[in-house]
Amino acid sequence: MLNAMLSVILVVGATDDPAPAQTEKAAGQAAELVPDPSYTPREGDRITIVADATPGFSRASLFDEYDRASDADEQAVLRAMIDKGQVVALEGKAPVLVIRNLDPAGAREPGRHYPVEVRILGGPRAGETWFVAESSLVRLVPKVVHSPLENGAFATIASPRTVAFVRWEAFDPAARSLNKAAVEEAFRLDEGTKVRILESRGDAVRVRVRNTSKLSGREGIVDRAALRPIVRPSRPNKPDPPPER
């Protein structure tokens, strides 16, 4: 809501939209980089602001002041903050340096928003320091695209203690809710265990453990995300032998 209001109040129909080429470049990068869902901002991290018109507050206490405003007063409170220079619209995709995260570990009050103090590292506000919501910050990491796993191919287990299930229904939420036996475990696999792909059904893959493990020959159904294909190293072609005389 706050982002939308900032867009209306602060962004005045600019006809000189900067560089469609930059927009295309950002879209191309977005296809390759994705937010890390497990990330929490920490002091010294270099991360990214998510979206355009992200509100930046000049003081941490302004978060509480804005949160205390009723729905009817929301726009008036925001307008007053803008007029005083206490809140600005920050550029999306801008790199920032985390100065401090004001979320008190283990003592968080329900419903209260705790800001993160950041220094802008790029764009028109480079060098400025603002307080922003933790949810408006992300760490972008390369998107992992796994090679397709064909029947008969070999793979390794990518995660420790990976569960191999007995039934296909373990990957069907409706079946799991109706039948507890659907999530029966066959065994667990250590990271690096080699397996052969027998059959795939969506994200569920039936595998057979190879003879490099104590579980050799056992079969179970695992999550496709827990598998990494084994890509054999390429070898240079050997020259043809000289013809016999």
Image (cartoon, rainbow, N blue to C red):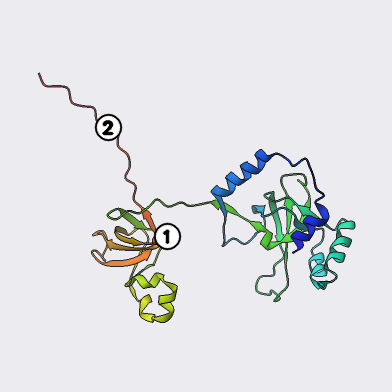
Residue 63 in view of the camera: yes
Q: Residue at x 73, y 40 (%)?
A: 18
Cα separation, mark 2 vs mark 1, equals 34 Å
The front one of 212 and 179 is 179
The front one of 110 and 46 is 110
Residue 84 in view of the camera: no
Q: Which of marks 2 and 1 is nearer the N terminus?
A: 1
Amino acid type, mark 1 = Ala
Give the image quarter of residue 136.
bottom right
Query: Where, quadrant-wise, is the N terminus in this rendering?
Result: bottom right
* Mark seen at residue 237: 2
Query: Where, quadrant-wise, is the C terminus in this rendering?
Result: top left
* Mark seen at residue 155: none
Is 211 on the left or on the right of 114, as rendered? left
The residue singled out by tag 1 in the image is 225
Q: Which residue is drawn at 78% across and 42% down?
A: 15
Q: Where is residue 205 in the image (x, y as percent from the top left)?
A: 34, 62
Instruction: Tell us which disc is closer to us: 2 or 1.
Output: 1
In terms of secondary structure, where does tag 2 sit? loop
Is 144 on the left or on the right of 204, as rendered? right
Amino acid type, mark 2 = Asn
Q: In this view, does 215 lie above or below 143?
A: below
Q: Position of residue 99 (x, y in %)?
A: 72, 56
